[in-house]
Image (tube, rainbow, N blue to C red):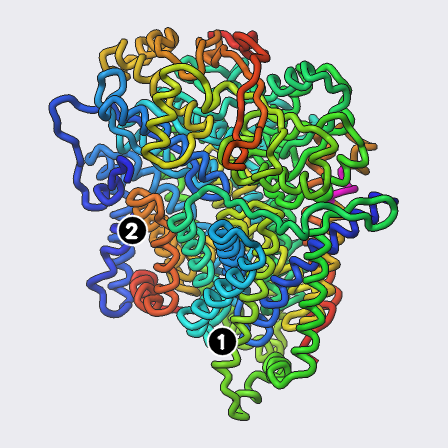
Amino acid sequence: MAEAALAPATPAPAAGRTRTMLALVMLAAALLALPFVATALGDSSIITLATRIVILAIAAASLNLALGYGGLVSFGHAAYYGLGGYVVGILYASLREPMFGVLPATDQLLVTLPLAVIVGGVAALILGAMSLRTSGVQFIMITLAFAQMLFFLFVSLKAYGGDDGLSIRRRNALPFLNTRDETTFYFVCLTVAALYFALLRRVVGSRFGLVLGGIRQSERRMEALGIRTYRYKLVAFVISGMGCALAGALMANYARFVSPDMLHWTQSGEFMIMVILGGVGTWLGPAVGAAILILLETVLAAWTEHWQVVLGPLLVLIVLFGRSAVERVAARIAGRRS
Amino acid sequence: MTGRTLLIAAMLAAVGASAAGAQEPVKIGMITTLSGPGGYIGQDIRDGFQIALDLEGGKLGGVPIQLLVEDDGFKPGQGKQVADRMMKSDKVKLLTGIVFSNIAVATVPDVLDADGIYVSPNAGPSNFAGKDCHRNYFVVSWQNDNLHESAGQNATVLGYKKAFILAPNYQAGKDALAGFKRFFKGEIAGEVYTRLDQTDYAAEMAQIRAANPDVVFQFHPGGLGIAFMRQYQQAGLLGQVPMVVAAPSMDATTASAVGEAAVGVNLTTHWNTDFDNPGSKRFVEAFQKKFNRAPTFYASQSYDTALAIGAALKGTGGKVDDTEAFRREMLKASFSSIRGPFKFGPNQHPIQDWWAAKVEKGPDGKPVIKTTTKVMSNHGDVYAKDCKL
Amino acid sequence: MVLVYEQVLNGLQLGVTLFLLAAGLTLIFGIMGVINLAHGSLYMVGAYAAALTAAKIGSFLLAVPAGLAAAALAGMAMEYLVIRHLYARDHLDQVLATFGLILFFNQAVVLLVGRQPLFVAIPAALDGAVPVGAGIQYPVYRLAILAVGIAVAIGLYLLIGRTRLGMLVRAGATHRDMVRALGVDIRLLYTIVFGLGALLAGLAGLMAGPLLAVQVGMGEQILILTFVVVVIGGLGSIRGAFFGALIVGVVDTLLRAFLPGALRTVMQGSEADALGAGLSSMGVYLLMAAVLLVRPRGLFPAHG
């Protein structure tokens, strides 16, 4: 996926409108062709790897809406990601053994996905409403605290697997499609991701997006203009939580497994890394960041068992020196920083 | 260092790698935990397997083997991905290596669903021993409960009447307490589930003291156990309340890390370095020589796993594609296990003997584990009856 | 009641360990504005250096300076090579870079020392248990940790309140730009403060060695709790770190000790323990969220 994503970037010197369109078309073509290339190469694990990147790209882009466009540095977005996953897991588990008799049970993706998004949104609304009363480092820490609380909540819920997590024996079903087929599932995820990224672009380009950008630059100025900034920030936070829940629900289907690991603070950290790698406040940057991080991990882990000793300093070096380079590449694909 | 391939690099370069050779080696995928606090267990599992390969010149049962090792990072999700990649890009059919039950529970169904074979060198969660048992799933180590059933039996044999029991709150921990209670005939003075990420057990020590039991049974594998034992000693409980544990709470590595505080602890195990059979001696010697440390029982299980796979491969002539044929050969268990008598039960989990042992002060002052008497013979597990194969 | 008394002692002892870590973190946070996720790695470095020295020389008392020195040097090297370049950056960059440092430190220890957890003996003088009243035998070593923690707290109080360095630290926490404008070598001050924070983290690590398992990843287990302490106490405030640490230590220990028991009266054993353990882990975060909502700058804010 990365080679597909990076390839169109090289020739374009500036982000002219036509060139951006051309790059997008090429990116789309590469993504569409990927499963067939992988099959031709006889390595279907490329497809599952790409699926994972596509899903994580949704999560990273969601975080980016709050973090990059809204300036809300959340260190707890794994909470919504995990919640989304658990919605799928719990609905599935209820199929086998009904829990409490009141919970609905379903394995229909068309039901579980929207439900996950709603649950994620409600959680983000409640937690965001409280967190947004703080700012700066305190905001980082309070989002972290809430995520940790949810993490420990799921660890302690034995009915839902506790530390061991919940296995989902079969992926959620879609009418007319066989989601168990890796290629089909890849296209399902890709479609969801495409729709989501298109939606994000509209949100960012809208009046709402402009106000949000304004708040990031100077909250006081926006308040002076008579804008109730708290509401805007909250809406951004909620949308971003919903996106993460969507990604979590897809990931639960992809991995056929959910566990409290999905809500762990290191997962929040990984989302942040993806956003930073790809470019804070860019449209497609987080997707590129997700691809870079996952590919780095995969390549290095296959190369040496001590891969972290390489990845760690690499991240440091990227922060210290290379970020602008990575960002430039991302920006070329993603278009201008808005 | 290990037989690792640059899978993804090959993928990126779009080069279809295919090893050319006279006899195509059988690929065995080992997914194990090499990072984090449990990393030393995965290391011993990898190294035990490697010794079996070394002693046979890179072969098992006369069949050349290519061993692919990858770290699961102690994350179930990562274990699944590694399994997926090994099966799809490397076309691995035969997998092994998982240390922790939660990772096995997440990963093994994927392997089996894709018509792969999994041979467990360690984790034997109850989920897969009963009605969810599978034709292509074999356990060479033990069913989780066995370890603790033997400890319960040992506590009964030693004549303790009132036990305080503790384990971390996850699947293997629950299996542990259930297993202990199944064979302990006395009274349970207290039952505490600790946290999997806990390192300070001061609160539990106070509870133990308040309950004033005859004996303490605890299951805290790896680093958890080290912290627990040391704090047990510091709380002044070591001399007062004896302790009965199963092998994972007191392996060779933990015993030497715990030091003096380990002396006097009763444990039960299915293998120990002092077992007096030629296979075991050969293994201990080769392991000590190559890695300059004593093998843990984890390493022995992995070595036995390699031998079991070797015997099956020999029977099938190095073929793993016909899973039924492989299964028939595997179930014969025609290898000589270094722990003595060994056969597979109806759920393809082991039936074996369990031994009591005690930690004693060695000649150099360091604690050593000495085997004493047999506590259980030909012991299977309680879940086998639910398994219909 | 006796049990409560003992558990409070346990809580205070956890508290002072947290304080040693939080003191450094809060200074670095407050003065340089850096979020250092790798602070837990310095704790690990201290523990490992002391454990290795103790194993080589056989004396825990000689291992103490080794652990302290290693942590301080590692901290200063970290500051010089990486953190220094992050002062002007936003929190995001700091999080990313120090996250990278965690990965590096953990794996470097695996490479250099191996995966086997290390053994550290308790110095003979501190072995055993003594009566502490109410018929309780309490480990001497834990009492020693408590004493060291309190001594360090007093020492830091004097250092910050009475010395020139302390004055600069206080000034740096409240009026960073002014201190710089007055021509103070702020770079040197930063390196010293970072080294001091690392030293305290190393001290916490080496003292935890004989108590816990010295193993890879031991720093992360305690890191997040330390952040909670720092935020509850108020960024940059040593006093806040001290009281925050004691509150968090006692609350966490008491919840963990008594909540499962309380739940057991209303539900079944294993479920009660699981829920109790989970809820008690949530307790400190709930506390932190509550403090932040009522007093967004923490209990003892350093700024004004």
Confirm whether residue B37 shows in the render: yes
Q: Which mark is residue A2?
A: 2
- Judging from the image, what secondary structure is the residue with disc 1 in? helix
**A22 with respect to A139 (left or right):** left
Residue that appears at 71% across and 31% down: C271
Residue B193: percent from the left, percent from the top?
68, 34
Residue that appears at 22% across and 12% down: B317
Residue C145 falls in which quadrant of the image?
Answer: bottom right
Same chain for mark 1 and mark 2? The answer is: no
Residue A42: percent from the left, percent from the top?
22, 32
The quadrant the C terminus of chain A occupies is bottom left
Q: Image height check: is B367 above or below A117?
A: above
Q: Which mark is residue C191?
A: 1
Confirm whether residue A66 shows in the render: no
Residue A266: percent from the left, percent from the top?
51, 51
Chain letter for mark 2: A
Binning the other alpha carbons within 10 Å of mark 2 as few (below 14), some (14 to 19) or many (20 upward) gives: some
Q: Amino acid at mark 1?
A: Thr
Q: Image height check: is A133 above or below B65?
A: below
Chain letter for mark 1: C
Residue that appears at 59% across and 24% down: B358
Of A150 and B176, which appears nearest the observer? Answer: B176
Q: Amino acid at mark 2?
A: Ala
- Judging from the image, what secondary structure is the residue with disc 2 in? helix
Is residue C257 on the magenta stretch? yes
Of A282 and B47, which appears nearest the observer? Answer: B47
Residue C40 falls in which quadrant of the image?
Answer: bottom right
Magenta residue span: C256-260
Residue C81: percent from the left, percent from the top?
40, 70
Of C112 and C301, which appears nearest the observer? Answer: C112
Is residue A209 on the magenta stretch? no
